[in-house]
Structures are given as structure tokens and as C-alpha cells.
Image (tube, rainbow, N blue to C red):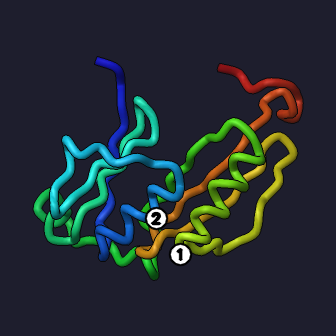
């Protein structure tokens, strides 16, 4: 089995969050979805599990963070071009997300930050490693 990542997030409005993440380019996998949680697919390796607070709490070992006022994590998605970064960012904003800071340009990487309705923070970026200062980083 391939190595995969499943990001689990508590959301206040499951339906609205499905719409938001669909606009960002995720698709729903109904096989792993029900009325209290949805499996959203980004790629063959990356999945987003969005769950009601009640369902999320059943898995949690600590209280659920208030991500509207405190940062609990940064989730970064690498994209194939700056145009794709901009298109997905604009789609997320038109779906009700916010962009708390403007685009950041590091020369070799451009990044935009988007927050969903619950304050979960996504960093969408394009990196041209050939522009990395001093050559390519060591692997």
C-alpha cells in the first residue's frame, strides 16, 4: 500500500465545508463519508477528513482547538504553477474563505494563505527549485 496522509479537521458546518473544499479542487469519496464526516480527496496520497465537532471529539484525546482565534496547524499544498495557486486561491475566496495576508514571493517560491470558515489555514504554493538561491538544496 502506498504511503498516504489523512488530515482530520473539525468543522462547524459540514455541508458548507464540503462546498468550500470542492471549490478548492477536492472531490468527495462517498465510500468513506456519512452524515457526520466526509472524506475529501486531493490526490492519490492526500485526503482530508472533515468531521462535525461531535465526530471529531470521538477520536480526539484533547479539547478541540478554536481555530478561529488560534493557529492549530498550517496545511501546505504544492501546485504546478503560480496560475494554479491563484486560481485555487480565488476559488476558495469566492466560496467564502479569507486570505489573511497577501501573496508572498520568496523568489523561488510564491505562496498564498487561505482560511476556511473554521479558521483552518491552507498555504498554497508554487516552487521553482531551479530558482533556489545558491543552487538546489541537498536531498
**Horizontal arrangement in the rendering, residue 80 relative to residue 23 (left or right):** right
Judged from the image, the secondary structure of the residue bearing numbered disc 2 is helix
Place of residue 67 in the rendered image (x, y in percent of width and height, measured from the top left): 41, 74
**Which x, y percent locates residue 122?**
54, 58
Distance from label 1 to label 2 (Cα)?
7 Å
What's the residue at 78%, 30% (across, down)? 129
Q: Quadrant of residue 37?
A: bottom left
Q: Nearer the viewer, residue 33 or 102?
A: 33
Q: Are marks 1 and 2 in contact (CB under 8 Å)?
A: yes
Residue at which label 2 appears: 20
Q: Residues within 10 Å of mark 2 (few under 14, many from 20)?
A: many
Residue under the point 55% across and 49% down: 76
In this rendering, does residue 22 appear at all? yes
Left or right: residue 46 versus residue 139 is left
Nearest the viewer among 136 and 128 is 128
Is 81 placed above or below 90 here?
A: above
From this view, report whether residue 125 is shown above or below residue 15.
above
Residue sticking out furthest to the bottom: 69
Residue 109: x %, y % from top left? 78, 44
- Quadrant in which the N terminus appears: top left
Tell how many labels: 2
Q: Please tell me whether mark 1 sits on a helix, a strand or a loop.
A: loop
Mark nearer the N terminus (1 vs 2) = 2
Q: Is residue 18 above or below residue 75?
A: below
Quarter of the figure with residue 131: top right
Residue tagged by mark 1?
96
Amino acid at each position: 500500500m502506498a504511503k498516504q496522509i489523512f488530515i482530520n479537521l473539525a468543522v462547524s458546518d459540514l455541508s458548507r465545508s464540503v462546498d468550500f473544499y470542492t471549490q478548492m479542487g477536492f472531490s468527495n469519496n462517498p465510500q468513506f463519508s456519512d452524515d457526520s464526516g466526509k472524506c475529501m480527496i486531493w490526490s492519490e496520497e492526500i485526503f482530508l477528513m472533515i468531521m462535525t465537532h461531535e465526530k471529531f471529539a470521538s477520536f480526539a484525546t484533547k479539547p478541540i482547538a478554536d481555530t478561529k482565534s488560534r493557529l492549530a496547524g498550517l496545511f501546505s499544498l504544492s501546485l504546478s504553477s503560480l496560475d494554479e495557486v491563484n486560481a485555487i486561491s480565488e476559488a476558495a475566496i469566492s466560496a467564502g474563505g479569507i486570505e489573511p495576508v497577501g501573496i508572498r514571493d520568496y523568489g523561488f517560491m510564491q505562496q498564498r494563505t487561505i482560511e476556511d470558515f473554521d479558521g483552518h489555514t491552507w498555504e498554497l504554493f508554487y516552487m521553482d527549485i531551479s530558482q533556489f538561491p545558491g543552487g538546489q538544496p541537498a536531498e
